[in-house]
Image: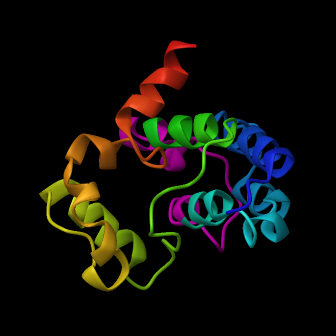
Amino acid sequence: MLIENDARHKAAELVDRFAGGVITNFEFDDQWPEAAGRRDPALRAIGSMLWNFYSETESHKLEGRYAPNNALRGLLSRCAAFLRTSLPYEWPHVNFSPPGGLAEFIEDVLHQGTLATHTLASHAAAASDREDRAAWPFRRRSDYEGIVRR
């Protein structure tokens, strides 16, 4: 598993700028390091997850009707923090684009069920702790808390 540190840092800055209302969704999408995402699963997973939270047809910043709620602010913060690490992306689920990817993941987090067995069967036991899933993209809550304490 390749970790693209330069691309991750660029992506972290993009997440921060998008979350802060500095750039539009189109600027965010156009500047996302797609090529590196083919090699680094963290970039692919985070990019596809965040794609679900902005319009593909209307240019906007994360403000007004697009302003993030607390849950999305937390996700954006965790994504930026993860991208500033050299931690490997350890979740087996890397595509959150429709159909079904994001919905299956959210349903699992909310209902503490197992994630789609066709994608996560080998990791079902490891993914049983809801707090760890709520720390996504960090695999373990302790990893996220260690970064926050720095």
Residue 70 is one of the magenta-drawn residues: yes
Whether 49 is drawn above or below 5: the answer is: below
Of the 4 image quadrants, the one containing the C terminus is top right
Whether 60 is drawn above or below 39: the answer is: above
- Decide which of 32, 39 is in the foreground and name it: 39
Residue 89 is one of the magenta-drawn residues: no
State the residue at coordinates (40%, 69%): 102
Q: What kind of colouring is applied to the model shown? A: rainbow
Q: Where does the image place residue 97, in percent across and percent down from the top left?
A: 51, 76
- Decide which of 7, 100 is in the foreground and name it: 7
- Decide which of 33, 142 is in the foreground and name it: 142
State the residue at coordinates (46%, 31%): 144
Q: Where does the image place residue 149, in percent across and percent down from the top left?
A: 50, 13
Q: Is residue 112 left or right of residue 3?
A: left
Q: What range of the chain is rendered magenta?
A: 49-73
Whether 73 is drawn above or below 150: the answer is: below
State the residue at coordinates (79%, 68%): 34
Q: Where does the image place residue 6, in percent across and percent down from the top left?
A: 86, 46
Whether 103 is drawn above or below 60: the answer is: below
Of the 4 image quadrants, the one containing the N terminus is bottom right
Q: Where does the image place residue 146, in percent across and percent down from the top left?
A: 48, 22
Q: Is residue 97 left or right of residue 124?
A: right
Magenta segment, principal secondary structure? loop
- Decide which of 45, 56 is in the foreground and name it: 45
Give the number of marks.
Answer: 0
Q: Is residue 54 left or right of residue 59?
A: left
In the rendered image, the residue lying farthest to the top is 150
